[in-house]
Amino acid sequence: MINKTFTKDMRETWMYGILGFLVFLLVWQAACVFTNFGKIFPTPKVSLAAFLQAFVEPIGRHTLLGHISISLRRVLIGYTLSSITGIIIGLLMGYSKLAHAIIYPIFCIIRPIPGIAWIPLAILWIGIGEPTIHFIIFMGGFSQMVMNTMDGAQHVDTELVGVAKVLGAKENQIFRKIVLPSSIPYIFTGLQTSLSTSWMAVLAAEMITAREGAGWLIIAGMQTGRIENNVIGMIAIGLVGLILATLLRNAERRLCRWTVRSR
Amino acid sequence: MDSTKQVKKEKPIITMERISKTFQVEDGEVKVIDQIDLDIRENEFLVLFGAGQCGKTTLLKMLAGLETISGGSIKIDEKELKGFNPKVGMVYQTTALFPWLTVMGNVEFGPKARGIGKTERQKKAQYYIDLVGLTGFEKHFPSMLSGGMQQRVGIARAYCNDPEIILMDEPFGHLDAQTRYMMEEEVEKIWQEEKRTIIFVTNNIEEALYLADRIVILTECPARVLTEYKIDIPRPRSLVSEEFLSLREEISSLVDLREGGNDAE
Amino acid sequence: MKEKTKYIIISIVSLISFILLWDLVSKSGIISAKKLPAPSKLFETFIYKLGNKNPDGNTLPIHIWTSLKEALIGFFFGIVIGVPLGISMAWFKKFDKFFSPLFDLIKPIPPVGWVPIMITFFGIGIMSKVSVIFIASFIPAVINSYSGIKQTREVHKWVSQTFGASNRQVLFTIAIPSAGPMIFTGARVALNGSWVSLVAAELIASTKGLGYMIQTARLVGRIDVVFVGVLVIGVFGAAMMEGLSFLERKLVKGGRRS
C-alpha cells in the first residue's frame, strides 16, 4: 500500500516536472516565433545546438570548458584564501573577547561592503590581472566567513565547556576539542553562502576586467550581439554553481555525521 | 586504591563548612544556599533530596569547581577546594555529551585530555563502556542513542576519568519511569563494583530511598539542611518492603509539611 | 558590567588607532595618497561630492537616490511575487511539482549572470537593473518561504485540525505566521542580494547610481571618490539591513529566528 502510493507520487512528480519544463520551452519557442523577442533571442533549439557546439568550438580564446575551468580556478584560489583567513579571524573573535573588542569595530567598516564594490578599488590598487580577480573573490566571501564562524564560536554550549573542564581539559584543549567542533556546522553554513557569493563575484569581476572566463563569455555575447553565447554562458554557470553547492553539501554530510540536521 | 579503603572508611572525604551562595540579579541578590554544613565519608552514597529547583545543582557545581563559593569553605581530602578538582567527576541532568564525538570519543575524553596514550585510554574506556552495558555501541554518535543509553555514556565518561567523587545531578530526571528504574539498578550495581563516593541529587523520594546510604533533605530556597536520614535497609532494596514504605511516608509528610501543600515541582 | 566597559574602551581605542594609523601611513607617504587617501581627505571629498557633479556628472545624493530606488523597487517586486509563490509551492503539491524543476534550473544562476541579458532586452535604463534585482530577491524569497511553510510543525497542524479548522484556515492562521521568521530571513538574504547585484549591474552598464559613480571615478583616477562611494555603499547596505531587522521585530512576535 505504502509502496503503491509512493510510486504514484513519484510518477506525478516526474509528470508535472516534465510538464512544467515543456511549458517553459513552449513559451520560449512561441515568444521567439510570434514576437519581437525572436529578433534578439535564440530559440531553445538554436541555444541547445550552440551549447553543444561550444564544447568543441572555441569562443574567443577558449572552448566553453576552457572558460569554465579558468573561472573555477580563480574562484578556488580566492575562495580558499578567504575561507582560511575568515575562519581564523572568526574563531579568534568568537573565542577571545579581547580580540573581538580590537578587531570587530574595524571589521564592521568593511563588512557591509559587497565584494563586487571592491572592483574599482582593486583595479586601482593592483591593476588589471589575476590578483585583482582573486582579491575581489576574496572580499566577496570573507565577511560572511568571519560572521558565521564567529557566530559558531560564540554559541558554544557553556555546559559542554564545563564538562570538559571537569574532565580536566586545559584552555587550549577546550579550544581545539570543544569550540572548534561546535563551530563546524556554522563554518559550513559560512562556506556555503561564501561559495555562492564567490561564484557571483568571479562573474562580475570577469565581466568588468577579464578577457576570458565564464563572466567574459556572457558579457562578450552581449557586446557582440551573439546572445546565444550569453545563454550558453548562463546555462554553464548555473550548472557549475549547482555542482559546487552539491559537492560542498556532501562534504558537510561526511564531516558532520553527528549533526541531526538534514537537508 | 583498594588497600586504603578500609582504613579511611570513617574519615570524611569532603567537608563543607557554612557554605553559602548568593546570585546577583537585576534587583539585588538572591540567596540560594544558606549555611550548609556537611561531611561526606569516602565511598558513601549520599543523596541530596529536596523538592524545589533551588540550590542543589549549584551545590554540585561548587563541588566541581564550576561555580564560585560566596561564603564558607569546601575541603576535599583536607585540602581547600580551589578551581577544578581532578578528583571530581560529574554526570549531568541533560547528559551533556559531546555531540560530535562517538560513544568511545566521549568516554575517553578525560584520559585523553590528561595525555594518556591511545591504547591505554581506549582499553580503559572500553572497560567502562562494557560496565554500563553499551558494548557494541562504541562508534555510535549520541544523537543515535536513546535517552537512557545517552545517560549511560555520561556515567561511563565520568567514571573513566578516575574520580574519587562522582556528582550526579538528577541524571534520570528526563527518563521515563521504566528506564529510570533500570538505570537506578544499574547505578547501584556499578557503585558496588567500583566503589566511589557518590553525591546524587534528586527530587524523587523512591529514587533517593532506593540508592542512598544517607539522605540529606534540603529546604527550598534558600537551601538549608532540614534533616538527614541514615538508610540501613539491606541492598538490593525492595520498593514495597514495609521499612521502605514507612520511610517513604515519613519523608513525604516531612516535605509536604514544609511546602505547606503548595504545588512544589 | 565593569568588564564590559573595559572592552568598549578597548574597541574605541582600537578604532581610533586604526584611523590614526591609516592617516599616518597616507600622509607620510609610506603608501602614496594616490593609492590610499587619508581619512581627512575622504571626508573633504564626501562633503564636496554632496553638492558637486564632478567627475561623473551627478551629485552624491542623486547617485544614492537612484541606487536606493532601483534596489528597493526590484526588492519589493521580488518579495511580493516570491513569497506567495514559495508559500503556494509548499502548500499545494501540484504547484510544487510543476514549478520546482523550473525553479531549480534558474536558482543556481547568480543574479549578476542575468545582467547582460537584461541589458540586451531593456537597454541600460532602470528596467534592466530592476529586473536583475527582482531575480536576486525573488529566488531567496521563494526558497525561504517554501522551507518556512514546509517546516510548519505537524503538531500545530494537527492541533488546529482537531479543532475543526479548514485547510485554508490552517494555512493562514498556522502555517504562514509560524513561517514568519523564515520568511524574514529570506527577505534579509534577498535584500543583501539586491544591493550586491545592483552595484554589479551599475558597474557593468549604467549612467547613474553609486556603482556607476565608483566605476567612472576609477576611470578618471579619482581614488578618493571611489573610496567615498565604496563606503557609502557599505553604509547604505547596512542601514537597509537594520531597517529590515526593525521591521521584523515589529512584525514577528513570539518565535525568534535561531
Image: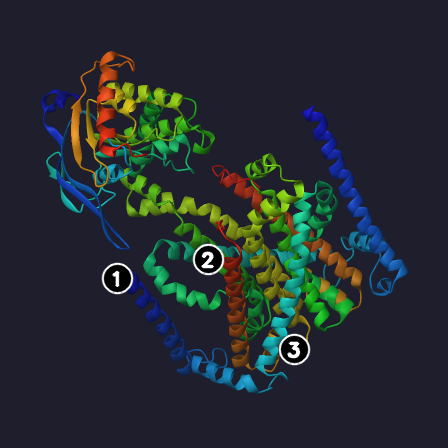
Is residue A216 in view? no
Type of amino acid under label 2: Val
Image colouring: rainbow
Which dot marks residue C208? 3
- The answer to which quarter of the image holds residue C167 is top right
Q: Is residue C149 left or right of residue C256?
A: right
Is residue C128 in view? yes
Decide which of C108, A70 is in the foreground and name it.
C108
Classify 10 Å Cα crowding around label 2: few (below 14), some (14-19), many (20 and above): many
Type of amino acid under label 1: Lys
Q: In which quadrant will I find the N terminus of chain C? A: bottom left
- Looking at the image, is mark 3 or mark 1 earlier in the sequence? 1
Chain letter of mark 2 equals A
Which residue does the numbered mark 1 point to in the structure image? C2
Which dot marks residue A146? 2
Chain letter of mark 3 equals C
Q: Is residue A114 left or right of residue B260?
A: right
Mark nearest the camera among 2 and 1 is: 1
Q: Distance from label 2 to label 3 (Cα)?
A: 32 Å
The correct choice, above or below, for B248 with respect to B241 in the image is below
Q: For the residue labelled by badge 2, is the local secondary structure a helix, a strand or a loop?
A: helix
- The answer to which quarter of the image holds residue C206 is bottom right
The residue at 25%/36% (across/down) is B56
